[in-house]
Amino acid sequence: MKFWIILLLALVVFVSCKTEKSSDENMEINSFINELMAEMTLQEKIGQLNLVTPGGGILTGSVVSTDVEEKIKSGQVGGIFGIYGPEKVKQAQALAVEESRLGIPLLFGSDVIHGYKTTFPIPLGLSCSWDMELIKKTAQVAAKEATADGIFWNFSPMVDIARDPRWGRIAEGAGEDPFLGSAIAKAMVEGYQGDDLSDSKTMMATVKHLALYGASEAGRDYNTVDMSKLRMYNDYLPPYKAAVEAGVGCAMSSFNDVDGIPASGNKWLLTDLLRNQWGFDGFVVSDYTSINEMIAHGMGDLQAVSAMALNAGLDMDMVGEGFLSTLEKSLEEGKVTEEQIDMACRRILEAKYKLGLFDDPYRYNDISRPEKDILSKENRQIAREAAARACVLLKNDNQVLPLKKSGKIALVGPLADSQNNMLGTWAPTGEHHLAVKVVDGFIKNVGSSVQIFYAKGANIVDDPDYAKKINVFGPKVFIDKRSPKEMIDEAINVSKKANVIVAVVGEASEMTGEAANRTNLLIPENQKKLIRALAKTGKPLVLVVMSGRPLALTEELELADAVLFTWHPGVEAGNAIADVIYGDYNPSGKLTATFPRNVGQVPIYHSIRNTGRPQGSDEFQKFKSNYLDVENTPLLPFGYGLSYTDFEYANLKADKTKLTESEVLNITVDIINTGNYDGEEIVQLYIRDMVASITRPLKELKAFEKVPVKKGESKSVSFKISVDDLKFYNANLDYDWEEGEFEIMVGANSADLQSVKVNWSK
Ligand code: NOJ
């Protein structure tokens, strides 16, 4: 008893010390900023709201800032992106600190989306690991490398839920599910920011793109978004909220409109929801010229849209300079208030304070760091593990995989010897020449014990006009001078000499990403021809598919004996793929976005609602919700992925069948490794609320665990479910649960589940 009292007292003291410390800290920040702002002119305050880029890295719009140096010196810049390296950053910082009137340091930002120089798999690939520790570790490495190079503000994580693989930016997020997406958002923010933003190895994160950007109509980037509040709150908003709860320092507004109002000028979104409902206390930055783009949205001229953005609660203007050029006039005309300008300026200064810039504006400019911290052996090892863990094994008939480290293989396909497509989209700080090609990874792995015959077999795409659109950030597609037939013939000839064919096919890295949308989800036709010809040889055919989006692989899954989906794997591509193909790592990844049978099924996702006329069986039924030409089910469901071993699920048990509000339900299940390899299984738990006040999904992911199970062994996995897991936003947008019956489903993927039913009453 005594012990508990002492423990409780200690806890109370600890919590009150912490709150005292944070309120002391807040007072300190406030008084510092009050003093500084008292010195600042209106123009200097507006200057802090201006984010510029001199044009380094990847440009994502048609405008570039001009006279950057002069603007910094005259206090017209708050932050900058597109400059890298401790010395260069220091020089630019010195312009602000030593040559502007008040010496206020600048923020230095960048898009560090999946690693800085040590490039990890694209985020959609990384999400398929379902491994929060690993994801956090990749963010920590990214922060360590970026800060070594002078960058301490990251335009990541991108947490937009995406259920439409036509949209090129599906590659940048964690897929379709709000529960998994929220867990990943949290892991990334924690990884980037650590416990202390002023630590010179952590960086400030930016949750983006607020909001609903992934729901652009027709999968076309920047397009209109229109959805019900219920869908927003239940499906699309949770990952942004999770990032806010994890303490993210910055939020970026999106290009699209939300409920008819462009996000960058949407007061409901940026103030009522983000700040008032969720308690966000960082600053909001626009996307690249997204304030100016409200002119094209039909919101008025530059002055009107800039005032609209500030009024909505947007603090910093990325590249557009509408704030810089119009806010003073808007203030004179009473269209904005001085308090609003002060507030935006204060939020940016607060971030600078928390980053430790006022203590030492050059804290991220240690020139000895890049050599130690960037692309270290350990970092590359993490990238190799991450790339292996991102792989999803889609098919493995007759245990073709793993391959034996002997015999002869034909390694063919346009991505087998490609270096420029390994990093994937949005790797502006990565270096292609450091990426390990698949062919090199194989040679390194198997040495002389395997004879490898290589042939390109096909171009990534044959059409030069299409290739031009993909090659905007440097050459990714090289069109061979030989005819398609000559290339296929060569591949067939080398295949004849081999015991097995491994064909590395798929998308070039810039076939996904920003403004890289497709209306067709197939592997390009010229590569399909190669695959058909290879299948005809009768040799075992393994497809290694690289892509930034789910593809409609119906034909390939029929033709090949094995399919390994690797996404774009990052700098260690070849090594990681060889690790998986040769069994040094047993694949454990599972899909985080549903794979459709064809593009007509899009948008497609697992947490669908029933409709009043659900299609009950696989057979076509008239007057049911279905298609004439294809069944409703996806090609591959959310959560799907194979292993070289087999897992059996047994003894699913619920410890109670009737519960009241305060009770916790224990669900247990045994995972038995019945195959021939040690492996890891991602056990998934879904819940269906059988009767509710609004239509509810047939299943919602509510828990998961990745468990290692040795061959021949069995592991018991348990999940604790409470009423918090039953909550949803109802028609009044209250977040609550409703009593009644619930189906609890556990299994290997969203379409392979065992279930128990329980009753929960208030
Ligand atoms: C536009 C993109 O939408 C955004 O994600 C990125 O952070 C900015 N450009 C800056 O590069």
Image (cartoon, rainbow, N blue to C red):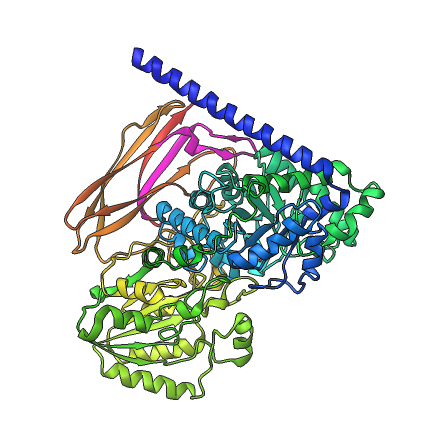
**Viewer can see residue 620:** no
- Image spot of residue 54 (x, y percent): 63, 62
**Residue at (83, 40) in percent of width and height:** 334
Establish if 157 lies above or below 336.
Answer: below
- Image spot of residue 133 (x, y percent): 35, 45
* Residue found at the very far left of the displayed protein: 712
User: Which residue range is magenta in the image?
Assistant: 721-748
Is residue 750 or residue 48 the one in the foreground?
A: 48
Which quadrant holds residue 393? Answer: bottom left
Q: Is residue 744 magenta?
A: yes
Quarter of the image with the C terminus is top left
Quarter of the image with the N terminus is top left
Quarter holding ligand 1: bottom right
* Residue found at the very far right of the displayed protein: 333
Residue 633 placement, left or right of 269: left
* Residue found at the very far front of the displayed protein: 98
Establish if 274 lies above or below 369.
Answer: above
Residue 710 placement, left or right of 642: left
Residue 428 placement, left or right of 657: right
- Count of numbered tags: 0
**Residue at (54, 47) in percent of width and height:** 206
- Image spot of residue 482 (x, y percent): 42, 88
Which quadrant holds residue 538? Answer: bottom left
Q: Is residue 154 magenta?
A: no
**Viewer can see residue 489:** yes
Is residue 562 or residue 761 the one in the foreground?
A: 562
